[in-house]
Image: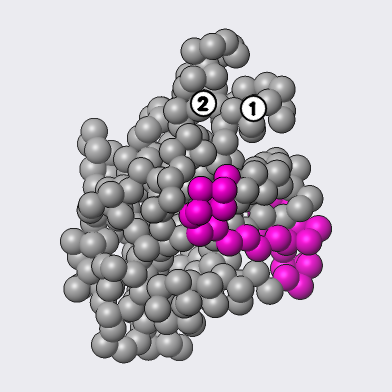
Amino acid sequence: MRYLLCLLALAFTARAELKTDIEFAKPGGVSLTLDAFVPEGKGPFPACILVHGGGFTKGDKTSFIKPLFEPLGKAGFTWFTINYRLAPTNRFPANIEDTEAAIRWVKAHAKEFKVDPKRIAIIGESAGGHIVSLVGVRAKGETSVAAVVPIYAPHDLEFQVKARNALGPSMTALFGLTELNDAAWKVLRDASSTSYLRKDLPPYLLIHGDKDAQVPYEQSVKFQEKMKAIGARCDFITIKDGGHGMGGWAKLNSDYQEQLIAWLKQTLK
């Protein structure tokens, strides 16, 4: 309720339009919904599709990612925040397929929501960061995007598991893995965006706190190194003393939101 009141207040003051709980796909009979915010004006506007985190097993379109709603709306972006199927009920690659379905849906409804289909960015945090990072390297045709912003994302699941020296509940839930063997390592490699890097990828912007205890900061450092080595554009915002989760960054007086908006405006101009 508090979330809806906040968004309704934003919509009212900006004379913009907010639509909630719009069904964009129904895989296997599961209704997937999104919320959409459209700025005032004729458009077409650049757009952002937001993908929440939650360890692949929890969260929804109103959780974790919501610190980005207000700054994106005020900056003149149409934005969509999406639900996707969660593990363990729905194993990989259900969440990837759902995000790709959302991209196709946004493009198909671009006129209705004043979206420029050539200026769409996908933004995800934590598990959602993994999703957008992988969707970005898989993207082609109807699922192609103009920019990708993974926030404290585990791009390399092999590295993530080795850093913890255990599969952990998220990997078990997402893939159904119970032990680390050659087959398990292959599953993790195949589900990692780092396995598919190439020079012609859309621009990436990484955002990561250097005190992240859940997803090592090195995930983003190594990802940028690999992207630069092949000549792909990959920018990086480090949150000094930042932990895991944007919610805690407000106490650090970080200007990451302003940096993100500036990068999006430059990249999607």
Magenta stretch, residue numbers: 226-254
Compared with residue 262, is residue 33 higher up or lower down, i.e. above or below?
above
Kind of residue at disc 2 = Leu
The picture places residue 170, in percent across and down from the top left corner, at 57, 30
Q: Nearer the viewer, residue 178 or 85?
A: 178
The picture places residue 77, in percent across and down from the top left corner, at 41, 76
Position of 101 compared to 263: left or right? left
Compared with residue 45, is residue 105 higher up or lower down, i.e. above or below?
above
How far is mark 1 from mark 2, CA to CA?
9 Å
Q: Nearer the viewer, residue 206 or 56?
A: 206
User: Element at badge 1?
Assistant: helix
The picture places residue 114, in percent across and down from the top left corner, at 26, 77
Q: Dots 1 and 2: beta carbons under 8 Å?
A: yes
Dividing the picture into quadrants, the one containing residue 218 is: top right
The mark found on residue 188 in the picture is 2
The picture places residue 45, in percent across and down from the top left corner, at 33, 78
Residue at 33% over, 48% down: 139
Q: Residues within 10 Å of mark 2 (few under 14, many from 20)?
A: many
Residue 57 located within the stretch drawn in magenta: no
Q: Earlier in the sequence, mark 1 or mark 2?
A: 1
Number of numbered discs = 2
Residue with the mark numbered 1: 161
Residue 60 appearing in the image = no
